[in-house]
Image (cartoon, helix red, strand yellow):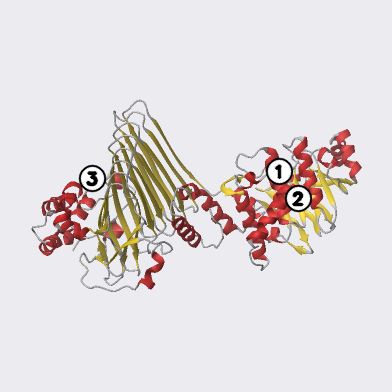
Amino acid sequence: MELKEKLISSFLAFENEVDLDSRVHDVRSEAIKVFENEGFPSKKDEAWKYTSLNSVLKHDYSVFPKHEKNVEYNDVKKYFIHEIDSYKIVFIDGKYSSHLSETTHDGIDVCLMSSALNKPKYQLIIDNYFNKIATKDSLSSLNTAFSREGAYIQIPKNKMVDKPIQIIHFSTGNEAALMNQPRNLIVVNENSHVQIIERHQSLTDNPVLTNSVTEIFANKRAIVDYYKIQNDNQNASLIDSTFINQKQESFCSVHTFSFGGKLTRNNLEFYQNGERIDSTMKGVTIIGNKQHVDHNTLVHHIEPNCESHQDYKGIYDDSSTGVFNGKVLVNKEAQKTNAFQANNNILVSDKASINTKPQLEIFADDVKCSHGCTIGQLDESALFYMQSRGIPKKEAKALLMYAFSNNVLSSVKIPEIKQRINKIIAAKLGVNIGFDL
Amino acid sequence: MLKIKNLHASVEDKAILRGINLEINPGEVHAIMGPNGSGKSTLASVIAGKEEYEVTDGEILLFDEDIDELGPDERAHKGVFLSFQYPVEIPGVSVTNFIKTAINETRKAKGLEDMPANEMLKLIREKAELLEIDRKFLSRSLNEGFSGGEKKRNEIFQMAMLEPKVAILDETDSGLDIDALRIVANGVNKLKTKDNAVIVITHYQRLLDYIVPDFVHVIHEGRIVKSGGKELALELEEKGYDWIKEKANA
């Protein structure tokens, strides 16, 4: 059976299992219809022109894993940013793991989507925020239809969250092939500040497909810093859709570090519903073999006096392929918008490729919008210069690549994340240089 | 220490060096002069091991070892240093981080541990002082936005840090005003010992007033056509290169 048919037929069982009286029952039913009509996107869709899901969809994924498998903290510690104290929301094969997690209801809610969807006290939040900003495209709709578990974070007014929150999804390989559909909802109220780290990690080489949707609401003057660490195994694929709704004077940043996985698609959309908003999205992609990473971004400038900053760096080796599609939309009313976009790429091998496409639609007449894409190779003269000072070629290359991604890392506010990313980059490049940016 | 025998080298099948012979002993300063396009910078790059240049004949011996098969980094580990005519800008890597990496990679190649941080700091301070480099300069991105003088001072600073056996200064005087020239030359002179050697590549006598050579060689069309003492440089300054070319072509 094709995956699409399997999912549609599974939906009935799913609805029965999670309660037909659920408040989001109608939302789910609507969503599955959208998926049923549209199916998985293909290369015929403009937004998927350079990313084919064919090789990912061919597996016979388990949609509801039956067996539970325990995971010990020591075995997976390395996937946490364990050097820092943090709240943790951890899932194993899609199911919440209480013994690996550290949630809280003390002044803030750092807990589970399943609670938020089912407990009456969260009803108002769900009514106001759930599925309100997510695009109604087929993959997000598929996630909405099956949304049951994920992280639910609610920060009331005037709260500086004392430590970062880590959301980690492990897949154990207990199933021959697993499909995960986590759904996160994050509501940050006025003047509050939160830092979130998200990771998807499979523990074996069994195929995993994750179709994740995250909705983030940043109210007035809220600050949200979100870090996505994508360094999964070679048979794990991720479709990550993150939608951010910002109110006036809020500041949101998303850093996406893409190093692993078979196929990764990042849909990242910012909607600026207020004045003097700042949206920042940065990415470092370093891949090789036949890996594929696709960054698809949108910033919608709706009101005046807002800023957006996009800076994506990519390094592609072997036969890897990359896509950057960055759309900046400036409404007629959004005067004095300041939008900046840059996408710089290095192709290390002759077989690697990148398709990059800035897309600016500007309807206001008093704005500053800039964009720039570059595709190049490592500078041979710089390599010779470094070698002539005793730095071996491999290390010299690594140093150049570090330097290339430097300004993306410089805006990371948690030093332990920066260190971790540096370590992953060093491992990725097969070098060990005590070089700290 | 460095022996160059009948060296022929070409780039993209174009022969540039056509039989260079040169012997350099510890404690010596050699000046290599010659008109534009004569092969001076090519010789420097070939000794340092630039891959684009192919050695088609002859050999380069360093401490009696043929270094033809060695990469530029391995030659550096054995004590070769090239001060670039046009130092390359490397945004995102500070002067300090770069030199630390260079020192520690060189130590690693020799089987030594990384230099302890406090020792490194002390060394950096000492050598920066020698080249009259201030501390702010050290945290800037390597060569990015440096003036001509800053670039060359930074080259000699790196030389001071790495303490090479054979230092090749490729037109280190170009782009320098008289003050920077004095600082750079003074730095080189202070680094000079009886165990190391310097090869100064230049068009002009000017630098040789400060770094006084024991030998002067004139390259023309890829060959050394005349060698002499420091007075040869003065003669060239006075008469130009035409008489050398005529003599060589006769």
Element class at badge 1: helix
Mark 1 is on which residue type? Lys
Does A174 appear above or below A230?
below
Left or right: A242 as drawn, with respect to B212? left
Q: Is residue B45 visible?
A: no
Q: Are the residues under marks 1 and 3 on the same chain?
A: no
* Crowding at mark 1 (Cα within 10 Å: few <14, some 14-19, many 20+): many
Element class at badge 3: loop
- The residue at the point 54 percent across, 56 percent down is A436
> Closer to the camera, A119 or B93?
A119
Left or right: A436 as drawn, with respect to A159? right
Q: CA distance from mark 1 to mark 2?
A: 13 Å
The residue carrying mark 1 is B152
* Crowding at mark 2 (Cα within 10 Å: few <14, some 14-19, many 20+): many
Q: Are the residues under marks 1 and 2 on the same chain?
A: yes
Q: Which mark is residue A133?
A: 3
Does B2 appear above or below A343?
below
> Closer to the camera, B172 or B126?
B126
> Closer to the camera, A264 or A51?
A264
**Picture coordinates of residue A325, whole percent (x, y):** 36, 43
Q: CA distance from mark 2 to mark 3?
A: 64 Å
Do the CB atoms of the residues marked 2 and 3 lie less than 8 Å apart?
no
Do the CB atoms of the residues marked 1 and 3 lie less than 8 Å apart?
no
Q: CA distance from mark 1 to mark 3?
A: 56 Å
**Picture coordinates of residue B30, whole percent (x, y):** 83, 49
**Picture coordinates of residue A257, whole percent (x, y):** 41, 54
The residue carrying mark 2 is B168
Of the image marks 1 and 2, the number of the one nearer the N terminus: 1
Q: How many marks?
A: 3
Q: Which numbered mark, 2 or 3, is in the foreground of this view?
A: 3
- The residue at the point 75 percent across, 62 percent down is B66
